[in-house]
């Protein structure tokens, strides 16, 4: 922890003091602000001055992943916010809760924002309980992942397993879906925006690196310019590859579904990549777009004749078996992936939306 309490009650942010002063503090008694047990000073040439419990124990402050990288980043972000005029505290306790976010920003209107700088992995339970605490108290939570977690695999590709997708962020409807990283070594942020999930670990996105000093806090959430064509191409290429080898690395449920389509006489490879479309809310489905979109075609969109109506309820029914429970907590959107997909099919002229919300088929299926 960066902060501890002196016997006289003062909270001391150790890293804010000079070397001589820290030397002087070594004679004082410090206590953990959470469990009140004694803590000792850890300071030296190579470390960020901080505190640690005298006896390792079960305390919320002895957070997992409180490595030096994390402490350094937390302190850098703290100074960065303070220098921009924000009222911000490190490790401040949330009233009536066993929770101390890395940073708590107090806005002038009384609203609060918790910033969690997460460098280590965190369990689903822990993540859910932390977010619940914030939500119940009307505190907006922003998760900034450690740069050590950023796995870029090529210009527009990012390795983003399901566990990492929990940190997808879209604070308002009109803001971009993104992942946010900060590297304490290079003192730079990385926003990954224009994210197109593929239903697999490989994820398409555009990377923006900005130094801490050149970035102001609100800019972290703004949309950044998009390389539209390159992003769409990267997504289509991944789809073609997945469709070409549909059984590779496929979980059992997917294999079963693929075998069923073969039995019905369809070859997945016959499905033109042109009908496959990326949708933002892909995270709410458990399978790649080529599975659920092909499923929609084979069960609903293809059997319909030109001029026939299809309701959204029918389409949602077909897709409900692919729904997933894991959902990013910081994404505010109410569009179901099927709705977005149908919008796109309307855009390319295959369907048209009726006034009552249903869809009418305008052209014969492209396969
Ligand atoms: Zn403690």
Image: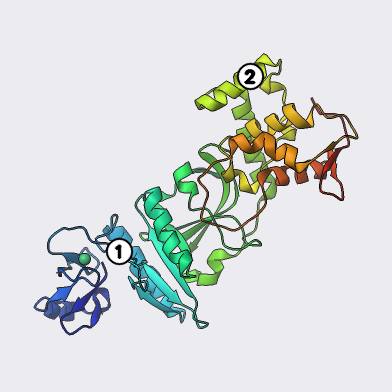
What is the residue that sits farthest to the right in this orientation? 307
Which of disc 2 and disc 1 is earlier in sequence? 1
Colour scheme of the rendered structure: rainbow
Look at the image and tell me whether residue 216 can be seen: no
Other residues around mark 1 within 10 Å, as few (<14) / some (14–19) / many (≥20) = many
Q: Where does label 2 land, which residue?
A: 260
Residue 143 sits in quarter:
bottom left
State left or right for residue 317 relative to residue 87. Answer: right
Which quadrant holds the N terminus? bottom left
What is the residue that sits farthest to the left in this orientation? 27
* Nearer to us: label 1 or label 2: 2
- The image's mark for residue 37 is none
Nearer to the camera, 347 or 217? 347
Which quadrant holds the C terminus? top right
Residue 289: percent from left, percent from top: 64, 36
State left or right for residue 278 relative to residue 220. Answer: right
Residue 172: percent from left, percent from top: 61, 63
| Count of all numbered marks drawn on residues in the image | 2
Look at the image and tell me whether residue 280 can be seen: yes
Q: Where does label 1 land, which residue?
A: 71
Ligand 1 picture quarter: bottom left
Residue at (17, 73) in percent of width and height = 31
User: Is residue 275 shown above or below 194?
Assistant: above
Element type where label 1 sits in the image: helix
**Cα gap from disc 1 to disc 2, whole angstroms:** 52 Å
User: Is residue 188 shown above or below 237?
Assistant: below
Nearer to the camera, 272 or 104? 104
Residue 315: percent from left, percent from top: 72, 38
Residue at (28, 55) in percent of width and height = 64
């Amino acid at each position: 922890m960066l902060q501890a309490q002196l016997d006289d009650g003062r909270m001391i942010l150790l890293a804010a003091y000079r070397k001589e002063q820290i030397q002087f503090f070594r004679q004082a008694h410090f206590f953990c602000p959470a469990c009140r047990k004694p803590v000792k000073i850890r300071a030296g040439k190579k470390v960020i001055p901080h505190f640690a419990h005298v006896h390792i124990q079960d305390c919320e402050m002895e957070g997992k992943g409180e490595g030096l990288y994390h402490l350094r980043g937390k302190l850098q972000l703290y100074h960065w916010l303070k220098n921009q005029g924000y009222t911000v505290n490190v490790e401040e306790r949330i009233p009536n809760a066993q929770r101390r976010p890395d940073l708590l920003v107090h806005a002038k209107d009384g609203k609060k924002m918790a910033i969690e700088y997460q460098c280590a992995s965190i369990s689903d339970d822990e993540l859910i309980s932390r977010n619940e605490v914030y939500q119940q108290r009307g505190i907006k939570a922003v998760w900034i992942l450690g740069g050590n977690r950023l796995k870029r695999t090529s210009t527009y590709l990012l390795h983003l397993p399901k566990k990492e997708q929990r940190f997808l962020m879209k604070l308002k409807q009109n803001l971009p879906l993104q992942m946010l990283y900060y590297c304490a070594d290079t003192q730079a942020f990385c926003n990954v925006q224009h994210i197109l999930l593929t239903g697999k670990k490989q994820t398409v996105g555009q990377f923006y690196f900005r130094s801490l000093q050149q970035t102001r806090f609100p800019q972290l959430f703004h949309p950044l310019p998009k390389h539209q064509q390159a992003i769409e191409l990267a997504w289509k290429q991944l789809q073609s590859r997945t469709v070409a080898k549909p059984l590779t690395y496929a979980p059992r449920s997917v294999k079963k579904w693929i075998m069923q389509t073969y039995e019905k006489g369809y070859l997945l490879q016959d499905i033109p990549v042109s009908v496959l479309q990326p949708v933002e809310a892909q995270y709410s489905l458990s399978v790649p777009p080529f599975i659920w979109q092909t499923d929609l075609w084979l069960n609903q969109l293809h059997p319909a004749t030109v001029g026939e109506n299809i309701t959204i309820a029918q389409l949602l029914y077909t897709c409900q078996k692919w729904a997933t429970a894991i959902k990013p907590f910081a994404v505010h959107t109410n569009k179901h992936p099927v709705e977005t997909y149908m919008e796109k099919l309307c855009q390319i002229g295959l369907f048209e939306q009726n006034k009552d919300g249903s869809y009418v088929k305008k052209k014969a299926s492209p396969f």
